[in-house]
Image (spheres, rainbow, N blue to C red):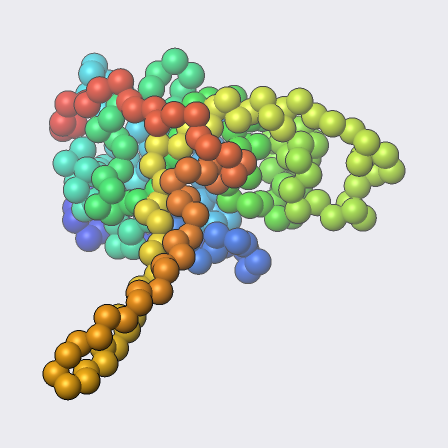
Amino acid sequence: MRKFTFGFFAAVMLVALASASRQDEVTLVLVPRDGDAARVGMDVANRYPTLLVNYKMVGGKVSLHGWSGKEWVNITLQDFQAGNFFRTAPDSALLIENAGAPIPQALVPSESWCEAVYKITTTQTRPLLHLVGQYYDFKYKDWEWFAENYKTTIDAINPERLNVAWYHRQLGDHLKKSAAAGEDLQYWVAIRHPRPMVPAVEEPATMLETNVIEEVEQPEMELPEDPATFNPLTNEAPAAVVLGAGEADTAK
């Protein structure tokens, strides 16, 4: 693997589905270097605009590599924290960690270059595919592809039957319920939501009469509901903001 230099990191993978709900957004996906999560990250990057980075903790230090579209290239911790490793800033970040091995706070993207950050705290294939698919809003062809390639069923990785039309369901499917639909949310953590959008309000014009400024009643400003109070997968309030175990030392 060759050394990463600023500006080298290629434009993120844009091999996305034409109808994908996130095809106009870029997601940073941070995955452990070893195991099935790395495979899931690569498969997602081949279908949606994804800035794919893997990580590994070695002797208390972190080693980072980014996918250029052709090869893995080294990223220093300093470049990662400063956002000096991409051409197009991500709209959000999805961090995936091994159970019992929290991602260090040093690997939580800075708000200066990535507002929204979420985390999945398992690398078990079934719940991982379920939560990633929910986050990306997989279309039916995506669910079908992942089920086939990971030797499972659509119902197992998509218990809510997201984007599965009635004609793709077997008779009686609507009567079935899956406990996984709710249980898998234990692995979902909202670290940081995007800042709420506040619409601009025009100042009312003042009226002048005999050099006296009359007071003009200010219209009430309607603010949108704060997205920071909602979990994007459930529309419920997130349980808590979970931080990493501690900053990792600078990678060589």
Q: Quadrant of the C terminus?
A: top left
216 relative to 162, above or below: below
Picture coordinates of residue 4, whole percent (x, y)? 20, 42
Quadrant location of the N terminus?
A: top left
* Residue 182 to residue 7: above or below: above
Q: Residue at x 83, y 38 (%)?
A: 170
Q: Is residue 51 visible?
A: no
Q: For residue 178, what is the image quadrant?
A: top right
Q: Residue at x 33, y 19 (%)?
A: 102
- Left or right: 40 with respect to 165? left
Image location of residue 242, percent across then percent down: 34, 24
User: Which image quadrant is residue 192 in?
Assistant: top left
Can residue 163 be seen from the camera position used here?
A: yes
Residue at 48%, 40% (x, y): give it.
232
Report which quarter residue 222 is drawn in: bottom left
> 123 and 221: which one is in front?
221
In the picture as drawn, the residue positioned furthest to the bottom comes out as 210
Nearest the camera: 209 or 19? 209
Q: Toward the viewer: 163 or 221?
A: 221
* Residue plotted at (54% across, 36% down): 234
